[in-house]
Amino acid sequence: VLFIFHFLINYMACCNKLTIEKMASFAPVKAKMEAEGIAPSAISAFESTFNSLVSGNTGIIPESTISPAPDLVKTDSIEIEPNTELLKETVVLKLNGGLGTGMGLDKAKSLLKVKGNDTFLDLTAKQVMKMRKDYGFEVKFMLMNSFSTSEDTLNFFAENYPSLRGEKGLEMLQNKVPKLDATTYEPAVCETDSSNEWCPPGHGDLYAALVGSGSLDNLLAAGYKYMFVSNSDNLGATLDLKILSHFSAVDAPFMMECCERTENDKKGGHLAVRNSDKQLILRESAMCADEDEPAFQDITKHRFFNTNNLWIRLDKLKEIIDKFGGFIPLPMIKNSKTVDPKDDSSQKVVQLETAMGAAIECFQGATAVVVPRTRFAPVKKCNDLLLLRSDAYSINEDFIPELNPACGGKAPVISLDSKKYKLVGKLEEATVDGIPSLVKCDRLTVKGLVRMSKKTTFVGEVSIKNDSSESKLIPTGEVKDATLDLTDAVGLGPLKADTVKSAPISGQKPGTSGLRKKTKVFMEENYLNNFVQSTFDAIKASGTDVSEGSLVIGGDGRYYNDTAIQTIIKMGVANGVKRFWIGENGLLSTPAVSAVIRERTPVWQKAFGAFILTASHNPGGPEEDFGIKYNCENGGPAPEKLTDAIYANTTTIKEYKICSEFPTIDIGTVGTTSVKGADGSTEVNVEVISATEVHVSLLKTIFDFDSIKALLDRPDFTMVYDSMHGVNGPYAKAVLIDELGQPESSCVNAVPKDDFNGGHADPNLTYAKELVATMGLDKKGNKIDVEGPIPSFGAAADGDGDRNMILGTQFFVTPSDSLAIIAAYADVIPFFKSQGGLKGVARSMPTSGAVDLVAKDLNFELFETPTGWKYFGNLMDSKDIYKGKDYTPFICGEESFGTGSNHVREKDGIWAVLAWLSILASENTDASKPLVTVEEIVTKHWAKYGRNYYCRWDFEGMDKAGATAMMDKMRSETATNTGKTVGSYTIATADDFTYVDPVDGSVAKKQGVRFLMADGSRIIFRLSGTAGSGATVRMYIEQYEPSKDKLNMVVSDALKGLVDVALGLCDIKTFCGTETPTVIT
């Protein structure tokens, strides 16, 4: 019975296998690759591998079919005169396609720091430059990047080695191939992230990439004959002129560098001779049958392994590729994975790869040489990384790692717990206090979680274990020939990090201003924690060392602010942060956070970033909105690359870290709280700082406070600044009352409240009702009768203090006009005048073109960007960060009441108010003359430049599906609408705004549907991503009027015809059920 049962099982398995082989077709795979634009050579190569898979070829090389490789020439024994002329015909190529996912990395592995602050790529670049200097010849250098490493790598070279980045042909892009369904062998599908459907085809793709990219033909045409190839993580593999000369002398088409196998190498592939044709071949572990495993691991029989340092004759390579119809048929390597590498429950797939060393069997006359171990120093595990980072290795004058002579010629053997230290992040946590000395160590074995220190010296053989769940400190000083059990050692006490299980929560994608949701959503279990942990993981992965410098935390004081701050502190400690700067009472305006990051000293404590707890102008309170955003070390919002990484982390998070026993910090008192670990190994400092000091000090260096005070002290000048119970109140009082000596009455609603006193802290004509009425206007900007005198100047701020509204006596200044006028008057502000005047201006695309006219007149650089301050930040940092053109000093603004300059990397409401006071002061230097008003300044500006009649209609709380469908319909009709006549207007261009950043080259698409009329008028539609719930449709209307006779029209009358056209084009009544906006600005 058992015999029959096993027979049936095997029979069914064979039938199933035969069915797959019969049904599996390359056609859908080919179609997918062609649709992606994959080169024909790569498709042909993959088809060969695919056919090998479906044919039932296991790739196994039986022991009986091979013989051991013969004795090989040792390069140390080669006696040959190095021929420098060969350098003219030689190209050096580094394989740089790996992400290092096996070590927990999600960026180019070569960007991992390996020695001090130097990454693999740093040392590679320095090796190339040193080689060129030594040989007196510009040896050609290339990289083969993958679709996953290209952007990071090229950005790295552009920022750090621009001369290399500028070389023609630096990059050759590795192909990508589809992952295959493990059952059907059809292309796999990943609904959550389509990029997961692709994988690198292994470094065997080198040959297909050389053909498909045209690099092979280009190199041959340029006279190149030899190529030296090695992995980017093998810093010992450099161009050796003696080996090159030997390769040329033996006239081999292909040469592999091998090392002699040791016990540590017995599980890796080896070189052999195929019995049938006496051809050298490479047998990897995946090609060995189970019964042949003892022979495979016999290092006395199979003595040599491939270092992946290869020498190739390019002309011979061309011949072989042509022979096989455009590719090299390499043995298949089959890997079983899941389509989402971070989700073990996702679809089972097969990833097919090939190895470039396997091509040795394709070259008749191929050979191999034995090289010293110094030419094989890859970093595959955290054991290797710890050793390389330690004092056991140094970097020599050729930028090659070499063993410290004090090691006696033998490197220490490192064995870290493979379960605890598989990932680089875990090693980073264990060595946050430095790398211990290993130069006198023979063997180090670690089992369990430990914390190391640069104050520890290992000598001889040391074994350490810790069976507890808490990481324990290895004693400092000399640890010699010892076996240590740290299980019962004292731990960190209040600094102990707990790991809490969690799971992804949908909808945590940050928008242009962070993540915003209803407060009750943030208060749900793990909601805030998941996002904060995802942010810490992303910023650490980007290369930021959170253990150095300070983390700033503050917000606009809205409900849940105080609780969130304590949570972030506890999670920050668990993630390695050693110093915090917290705004007094948890308050810091958004521009003040940027100022603190950029300006606060001492330098050794300089902030590396900040969490800002704000939903900006959105309402606050337990039933309203809460938000969180992260700003980087330049003081600006996290770039899209970082926010994308944060979001990706939120979709895969499984746990977060928090120091549950860390004490609650009194954030109401300025001062420092120091908390030490129970074992005395570390200390965390939480400093509560003045919310206003740094920002106000910065503003005093920008503006002439004396001239502003002279204006404010005039008997015919009065002003009122409405902070709308947001965070701006303390800043308004610090400037106007404390610095400029004005009465308390000049600051209204200046006490921050967690619900903004039940109001909507959005500085516009609709929501700043109290101020608007005080200034003699209604919510449409029309004049109204007011009892008593009206102030000369009025201003309002939003919840987090980054927005502003400017008013004169019964006069509203649009944000677009405000930006243009500040730019025109920039020289009255010392910050600009002392630097030679304003150089550049920028506006968001929906903002009116008023500032464009000023820029053209005064010869300023002008930029039109998507909505979002981060785009302005790139322009401001063009020189300092990107080594590009200097556009500063710089002014920028958005129609949504945001204005600022390069003094910080956020819009700055109080800065705009002081700019306007500076303008008024410059026009009122003679106190004996009548006051020149806000209205007079604006009308004079219109008389010179013309007027951009402009308004914005906000439809808040719209159904998101309906609003999205409306936008999609307009996008789909851009081509048909172009050239169409609507009403009295002709649509010259209808499009969806796309922005190519002039600084970093990034592309932002779908930034707003535009209807650009032939007469210069504009209609624009956008969906706002900053609301806590629902969707906000923004409709922008602009019409330029140059005629001096038409400068004083009522805005609604001037734009009525264009508004009617806009409502017809969008059909918002059908999609959203209304044509009545909630706010008109």
Image (cartoon, rainbow, N blue to C red):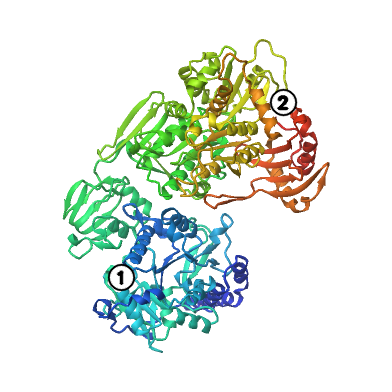
Left/right placement of residue 11 relative to residue 490 reads: right
699 up-or-down from 339: above or below: above
Quadrant housing the C terminus: top right
Q: Residue 112 occupies which quadrant of the picture?
A: bottom left
* Residue density around tag 1, few if under 14, some if 14–19, many if 20 or more, within 10 Å: some
Q: Tell me what residue is drawn at x 76 percent, y 48 percent.
A: 988
| Tag shown at residue 780 | 2
Q: Nearer the viewer's eye, disc 2 or disc 1?
A: 2
> Residue 733: in sight, yes or no?
yes
Which residue is under mark 1?
Answer: 265
Q: Amino acid at mark 2?
A: Lys
1043 up-or-down from 438: above or below: above
Viewer-side residue, 296 vs 325: 325
Give the mark nearer the N terminus: 2 vs 1: 1
Viewer-side residue, 446 vs 210: 210
The image position of residue 402, as x and y in percent, is 26, 63
> Residue 296: in sight, yes or no?
no
Q: Amino acid at mark 1?
A: Asp
Q: Residue furthest top?
A: 788
760 up-or-down from 31: above or below: above
Viewer-side residue, 824 vs 121: 824
Q: Tell me what residue is drawn at x 68 percent, y 38 percent.
A: 1034
Left/right placement of residue 154 relative to residue 390 reads: right
* Residue density around tag 2, few if under 14, some if 14–19, many if 20 or more, within 10 Å: some
| Tag shown at residue 41 | none
Viewer-side residue, 875 vs 420: 875
Q: Residue 929 occupies which quadrant of the picture?
A: top right
Do the residues under discs 2 and 1 have CB atoms within 8 angstroms?
no
